[in-house]
Amino acid sequence: MLTLVLLLNPIAIAVGNIAMRKMRKMPELVVSSYMNVTLGILSLCIVYISGDDLSPWKKFNWFDWLMTCGLSVFVLFSQTFRFKAYKEYETSKLQSLTFLIPLYQFVADITMFDATFNWIQILGLSIVIIVNVVDASIIWGCPAPPKKAVN
């Protein structure tokens, strides 16, 4: 079940980005609220379908709650800024930055949590890094084609 959920992560990211593009005329906080309510309900369903429950929350100390609240605030900031970027900039240029989140998570896991990874995880993250570097260099490094003059 966990493997299926992990495979759905890129699809969930893509669906969230499409939803943000479709709701450009709405205020940023409304879009962020819709996304978080939807993800919360979906996450609860996945937790209970997989046979788990929310009992680990009972063991949280003050620091765990502080980090959870901090994460929530930064997720809201991230969604709000990303939505503003979708409103202001051409979507094709922003698309190359979408899958950098696993890279940030990888760096945090190594630097802060001393996590170890197997060769499949390192291969997958290497592919993500290579694709992002090539994509960003193509999109951001190439000059835009000249615009045709309008008579």
Image: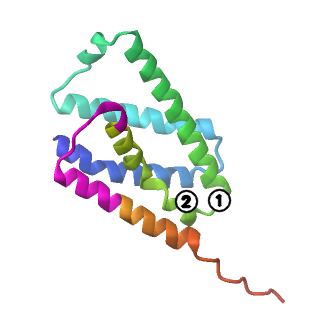
Q: Position of residue 112 (x, y in %)?
A: 36, 32
Mark 1 or mark 2: name the one nearer the start of the chain: 1
Closer to us: 138 or 22: 138
Farthest bottom residue in view = 151
Please give the name of the residue rendered at 60% of the width and 43% of the height, measured from the top-left corner: 81
Please give the name of the residue rendered at 19% of the width and 40% of the height, measured from the top-left corner: 2
Residue type at mark 2 is Leu
Closer to us: 97 or 129: 129
What is the total number of numbered labels drawn onto the structure image? 2
Mark 1 touches mark 2? (CB < 8 Å):
yes
Classify residue 79 as left or right of residue 49. right
Residue type at mark 1 is Tyr
Neighbours of disc 2 within 10 Å: few (<14), some (14-19), many (20+): some
Closer to us: 104 or 146: 104
Please give the name of the residue rendered at 18% of the width and 54% of the height, measured from the top-left corner: 120
Residue tagged 2: 94
Q: Is residue 33 visible?
A: no
Classify residue 43 as left or right of residue 136. left
Neighbours of disc 1 within 10 Å: few (<14), some (14-19), many (20+): few
Q: Please provide the residue range marked out in magenta.
A: 111-128
Tell me, yes or no, whether the highlighted magenta stretch contains residue 148: no
Q: Position of residue 33 (x, y in %)?
A: 53, 34
Q: Which mark is residue 111?
A: none
Residue tagged 1: 89
